[in-house]
Amino acid sequence: MSEPDVMPALTPEEWEQRFFRRGDVTGFGFDGESISIVRKAADGTVETVRLDREEERRAVAALALSSQPGGLTWQDHDDQVITAVLLSSYEKGTPFSDLDDGLKKALRGVLARSGRRAARIAALLPPRP
């Protein structure tokens, strides 16, 4: 089964305007200092939540990304650790051929997953300047 394409979270225009609309939800960003989310309630009233503090924004981002195609996983974490081990080995002058078989196998897995991980990360970032 092939994995679905990872679509950018925001268009370049939305990043520039710091504004998006998805269904009934509208979001506004203010110079990176706060985010406001607006949604029409079932009774027709408009509900607004403004997230001003970093810890609020981080908590919402973590929950929003959990189990989503664009989110990060423990596999991503472990791949970063394995990559760090490889880079440390290279820095010490240890060639790939001298690594133990378990690490070689793990590195092959990291390589196989790296393109997909890069696409997921890129989908969450603003356009390059």
Image: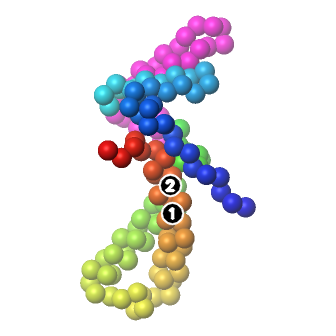
Residue beneath the point at 36% across and 47% down: 128
Q: How far from the left and from the top, in percent, is residue 61?
A: 46, 38
Which residues, given as a range, are shown in magenta?
A: 36-63
Quarter of the picture containing the N terminus is bottom right
Of the residues shown, which amino acid type is indicated by label 1?
Gly
Q: Using the image as rendered, state which of residue 108 and residue 128 is in the foreground.
A: 128
Q: Say if 31 sits above or below 70 in the image.
A: above
Quarter of the picture containing the C terminus is top left
* 31 with respect to 10 (left or right): left
The answer to whether the residues at label 2 and label 1 have Cβ atoms under 8 Å apart is yes
Q: How far from the left and from the top, in percent, is residue 42?
A: 66, 13
Determine the residue located farthest toward the bottom in the rendered image.
98
Residue beneath the point at 40% across and 92% down: 98
Residue 48 belongs to magenta span: yes
Residue 29 figure quarter:
top left
Q: What is the secondary structure assignment of the residue under circle 1?
A: helix
* 15 with respect to 111 (left or right): left
Look at mark 1 in the image and give the residue it sits on. Answer: 115
Look at mark 2 in the image and give the residue it sits on. Answer: 119
Residue 2 belongs to magenta span: no
Please say whether residue 106 is visible from this viewpoint. no
Of the residues shown, which amino acid type is indicated by label 2?
Ala
Q: How far from the left and from the top, in percent, is residue 84?
A: 36, 70
Residue 59 figure quarter:
top left
